[in-house]
Each structure stands twice: as C-alpha cells, then as structure tokens.
Image (spheres, helix red, strand yellow):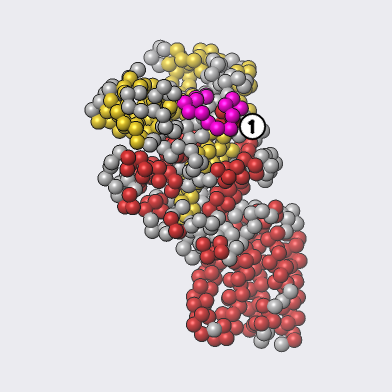
C-alpha cells in the first residue's frame, strides 16, 4: 500500500507527493473521508489524481492512499434493472441507506451481497475449461439468462462444482489452474474499465439492429455491432431518439449511459421503462436494461469513468453471446470533462481547448463495439453496438467533438433544428445523414423483408433529393412554373416526409413500426405515385389528384395497429385505384 500527502487541490484534480511506487490508473483514497480517485499522470514521486467526488474540505497535507488496483467494475448477476453512478455505486442502495443525497466517501458494493441466485452448473467434475467457457447459468431476469463464465486468461480443471442458491461472492466450485494453484469459482468477477475484454475474432456486421424508427431502418440503418452518432442542437430531439432506440431496438440488453445530461432525462427513463412492454418479449423494458446515471450536477471527473463503466458491462454480456447496445448521452459532456481535466493538468490545448488526445479517446470507446466470436469452446457470437449523442454548441457540427466522432463511426443521424421547429420528429435530416452499412445489409433486407426493399428505399432517397432541387426552383419562379410531373413529385415527397418519415414517439401504434409494416407503407405511397402518374398522362388535373380524400387515409395509415395493417392497407390501395380511375374517366 502506497501512501502520500496532498500538495495541491484544484477542483477535481489533486496532486500528491510520495507516490513513486504507485501505478498509473490506480484507484486511490483521498483525505479523511476517503474520496475515490484515480491516478491519471505521474511525474517522479508526484501523482496527479482525478477525484470522482466533490473535493471541498480536503487540503494540503491530507493523506492519499493507493489501493494498488485499477478502477474496476463488478460483473455478475444483479446488473440488470440496476441504476449506477459513473463509478458503479448502486444509487438505489445509497438512497435507501443514506437518503436522497450522496454523502462523500461512501462506498457500497455494486452487486447486492444479500441476494441469493439459483446457480445451475453446465460443466462436470474434472472437466477441462478455459477463459470464456460457460460454467453454469443464473436466471437474472424474466427475459435474460446470465451465463457464469471462466474469467479471460484462466485455464484449468473443475475439481468442485455445486448447484444451489448462492450470493454473488460465495463459492460455487473450485478450479485447479495449470500451475497447480486452486481458485474459487464465484458468480461474479472484476474487470478494469479501461481495458477492453478479449475475444477470439472480430466479424463483419451483416445483420441490422432494427429500431422500429422508420427513418433509421429504411434510410440509414445501423448494423448489430455497428457504431453511430446523433449530433444536433438543443431541442432537436437527441434524447428522444436515444430513448426510442433504447426502448425498441431488437437487442438482448441495453446499457444506457446518462453522461453529463440533465437529471430529469434520466428520471423520464426510470418512470417510462418499467411501464413499457418490449414487443419482442412481452415483458417490461427494465428487464433488459442497465442504467448508468452521471448527470450534469454530479462531479465532472466521473463522466469519463461512466462511459468506460457502461461499455465494460456491455462487453461482459456480449461475451455471453448476446446482442447489446450501448447508448451514451452525450459524448460531448464526456469531452468537456476531458477538456477540464486537461486544462487543470496544464497540458497543451488542441482545437477549442480540447486535449490533443480527444480523437484517440473517442476511438478507444467506439472501437470496443463490434460483432465478435466470443472466447470459449462453443464459438458463440456476440454483438456490441455503440450509439453516442453529440451536443455541438449552437448546432455547429464542424466543432472538434462531432468531427472526431464522424471520422470513427459508420452512421451519421444528423438532427436538424429547422425540422424540429416544424415539429417533424425524428428530426433526422435525410439530405446530410448517411449510413455506411446500407450496402452490407442489403442482402439481409432483401432476404428477410422483401426482394424490392433496397430498390424502394433507394427510390425514397432519390425522390427526397429531387424534391430539394425542385423546392429551390419554386422559391425562384413559383409553383406554376413546374410541370404536372414535377408537381406530382412534390406531392409524393410530401407524403414520404409526413406519412412515412415523421413519427410520433408518444402514440402507441406509431412509436414502433415493424419492418413488414414499413415495407407495406412504402408500397402504399409508391402505389399512389404510380397510379397518379398514369392518371396525369391520361389528362387528369394534378390539383384534383392532390385533393383526393384517399390521401388523408394514406396519412393516417402509419397509425394503423400492427395486427390490422395488411387488411387496411389493401383497402386503401383499392380506394386509390377507384378514386384515380373515377378522376381519369371525368377528364
């Protein structure tokens, strides 16, 4: 144990001397109240420590004691449905024991030591096992089975294993390692948050993460194991997009990191998720969710730890063979914490005061995503998708955090303040957003949804781009200068925007849309376009076509319940034909 004394306190930064024997990234206890900190820089016997708690009250000469261990998280049954702070302290437990406000220096184990879990072994006595092999299972929630694994890097023979009800720190068996030493098997393991968990092989992502959000699934899909960012100005709906992804994405587990955002946004999650039903399982969404809450009023240094804590928990479940999504809201607040600590360390600033290593830190986070072959003898596959919100000041995406993120991620959902102002949500601008997974996922959509899916979605994008060009002409010379075909193109583009892309997160039947319903909705819009174009060629008046009553039914089609859409859409399609035929006959 290394002990030193404080020389200087500068906000969350503490400099201590006498720490020559300590290591980088060791967890330390600072002052009489034993505040939790981490060594982030060493110069001779002086250590620079970022403290994850409020440093008021500590001063020069106070003790600093190194634990000799890196900042780590506890991994085991009990993570799901829990809400932690940035350094994995269980906030619900802290509230029950100490009240609504977190007291400085308190430390509670992340996993409940009193709860018992029923462990069912899947290995036999004398069986050879290695890192990643599954030793047994625990029913952690109603929708997810927790797999107890051999820790990475361990290899040996099972010399004792038991079925029964155990606490996470109790022995369920023994493992004789290759060097002859014997290690106890428990239901939990620890892992340093800054070190990514190993895997056998990284695979190319070939399956989409279905979100139920039409603008995302149809135009800018993300793959399971992919990376995406959601930049946008204040009020453009970043948090609602993040919440929608957390609610409806077809993944086995969601780790939601509230990093530096407002506390009421985390409150919304805590209120909504227990009441919402997952369409895949029929159970509460909290049954597949882990929450990391490090809101804007919490110590700034803990923001950096929170994103590493969240993605380490996600990697742990990925290693079980599950598909996991990490949603970070927002990485801009994390970058601001890096900037503050860099300034206090008196490092040479980069662009806009951010540290020169901003891009590499962002890359370290996003590169931990991916689809992998997990460790273990069974060759199971797991996927970890990383989605980060970015909050550029004034909505200027040319600022360093957004630009550094865009160089790393493969999907860009650019939120537009003008769309949000017009109440078009999700306010994802279809003209500047992109997905580099579209071509890779084309075969999956063609096989699982419809053979024409990729052609239809490409046609959607083309119409929206043509509309943008036509709108410029209209601004210059007016609508009357356009041909009937161009007028029809604008009407179809309006239908795509308002009847397909616009989505109400607070309406039950519109909040989530299956791929089958999305495909049928696109087909309905194109059916109107194709039949209307034939009517225009036959001499029908474009003004009367635009005013047909069936267009209102097309607009309401997105709110048709999933169980009824096939029947209702067929009725609307017949009505399109009947009204256009009648109009053509009159002309």
Task: Judge by depth and name the residue closer to the eye, 268 or 318.
Answer: 268
Task: Give the main secondary structure of the magenta stretch.
Answer: loop
Q: Position of residue 123 (x, y in %)?
A: 55, 20
Residue 213, horizontal then vertical, whole percent: 59, 55
Quadrant (top left, top right, bottom left, bottom right) of the N terminus: top left
Residue 27 versus residue 366 in the image, above or below:
above
Note whether 275 is above or below 516 in the view shown: above
Start-end of magenta stretch: 96-109
Query: How many discs mark residues in the rendered view?
Result: 1
Residue in the image at 33% along x and 19% along y: 2
Q: Residue furthest left?
A: 44
Whether the magenta-drawn stretch holds residue 108 is answered as yes
Where residue 140 sits: x, y (%)?
Answer: 62, 29
Q: Quadrant of the C terminus?
A: bottom right
Residue 233 is inside the magenta segment: no
| Residue on which the image places disc 1 | 141
Residue at point 43%, 27% (across, down): 35
Query: Left or right: 568 with respect to 182?
Result: right
Q: Residue at x 58, y 75 (%)?
A: 490
Determine crowd level at label 1: few under 14, some 14-19, many 20+ residues with C-alpha closer than 10 A. some
Determine whether 138 is above or below 472 in the image. above
Could you say whether the residue bearing mark 1 is in a helix, strand or loop?
loop
- Residue 395, percent across and down? 45, 59
Residue nearest the observer in this picture, 2 or 377: 2
Report whether residue 97 is seen. yes
Residue 280: which quarter of the image? top right
Residue 22 visible (yes or no):
no
Q: Check the image and report above or below for 529 versus 348.
A: below
């Amino acid at each position: 144990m290394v002990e030193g004394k404080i020389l200087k306190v500068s906000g969350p930064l503490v400099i201590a001397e006498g720490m020559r024997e300590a290591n980088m990234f060791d967890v330390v206890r600072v002052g009489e109240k034993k505040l939790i900190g981490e060594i982030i820089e060493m110069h001779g016997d002086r250590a620079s420590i970022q403290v994850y708690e409020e440093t008021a009250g500590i001063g020069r000469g106070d003790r600093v004691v190194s634990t000799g261990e890196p900042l780590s998280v506890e991994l085991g049954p009990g993570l799901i449905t829990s809400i932690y702070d940035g350094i994995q302290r269980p906030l619900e437990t802290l509230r029950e024991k100490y009240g609504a406000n977190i007291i400085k220096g308190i430390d509670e184990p992340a996993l409940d030591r009193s709860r018992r879990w029923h462990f069912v072994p899947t290995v036999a006595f004398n069986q050879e096992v290695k890192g990643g092999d599954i030793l047994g299972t625990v029913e952690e929630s109603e929708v997810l089975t927790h797999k107890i694994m051999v820790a990475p890097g361990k290899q040996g023979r099972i010399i004792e294993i038991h079925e029964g009800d155990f606490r996470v720190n109790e022995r369920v068996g023994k493992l004789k390692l290759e060097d002859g030493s014997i290690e106890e098997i428990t239901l939990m393991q620890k892992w340093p948050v800054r070190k990514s968990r190993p895997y056998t092989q990284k695979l190319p992502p070939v399956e989409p993460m279905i979100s139920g959000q039409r603008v995302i699934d149809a135009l800018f899909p993300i793959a399971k194991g992919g990376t995406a960012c959601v930049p946008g100005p204040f009020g453009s709906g970043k948090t609602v997009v993040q919440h929608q992804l957390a609610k409806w994405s077809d993944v086995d587990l969601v780790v939601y990191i509230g990093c530096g955002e407002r506390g009421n946004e985390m409150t919304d999650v805590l209120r909504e998720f227990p009441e919402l039903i997952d369409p895949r399982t029929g159970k509460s969404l909290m049954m597949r969710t882990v929450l990391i809450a490090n809101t804007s009023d919490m110590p700034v240094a803990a923001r950096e730890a929170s994103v590493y804590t969240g993605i380490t928990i996600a990697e742990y479940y990925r290693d079980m063979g599950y598909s996991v999504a990490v949603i970070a809201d927002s990485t801009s607040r994390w970058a601001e914490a890096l900037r503050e600590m860099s300034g206090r360390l008196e490092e040479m600033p980069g662009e806009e005061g951010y540290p020169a290593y901003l891009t590499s830190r962002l890359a370290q986070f996003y590169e931990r995503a991916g689809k992998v072959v997990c460790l273990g003898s069974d060759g199971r596959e797991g996927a970890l998708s990383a989605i980060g919100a970015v909050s550029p000041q004034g909505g200027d995406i040319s600022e360093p955090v957004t630009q550094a993120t865009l160089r790393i991620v493969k999907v860009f959902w650019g939120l537009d303040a003008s769309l949000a102002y017009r109440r078009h949500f999700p306010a994802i601008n279809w003209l500047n957003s992109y997905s580099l997974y579209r071509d890779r996922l084309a075969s999956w959509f063609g096989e699982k949804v419809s053979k024409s899916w990729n052609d239809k979605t490409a046609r959607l994008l083309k119409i929206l781009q043509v509309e943008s060009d036509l709108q410029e002409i209209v601004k210059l010379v007016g609508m009357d200068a356009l041909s009937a075909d161009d007028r029809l193109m604008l009407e179809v583009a309006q239908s795509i925007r308002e009847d397909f892309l616009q989505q109400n997160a607070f309406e039950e039947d519109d909040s989530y849309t299956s791929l089958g319903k999305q495909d049928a909705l696109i087909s309905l819009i194109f059916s109107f376009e194709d039949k209307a174009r034939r009517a225009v060629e036959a001499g029908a008046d474009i003004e009367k076509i635009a005013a047909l009553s069936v267009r209102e039914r097309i607009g309401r089609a997105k709110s048709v319940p999933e169980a009824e859409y096939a029947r209702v859409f067929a009725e609307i399609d017949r009505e399109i034909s009947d009204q256009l035929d009648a109009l053509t006959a009159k002309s």
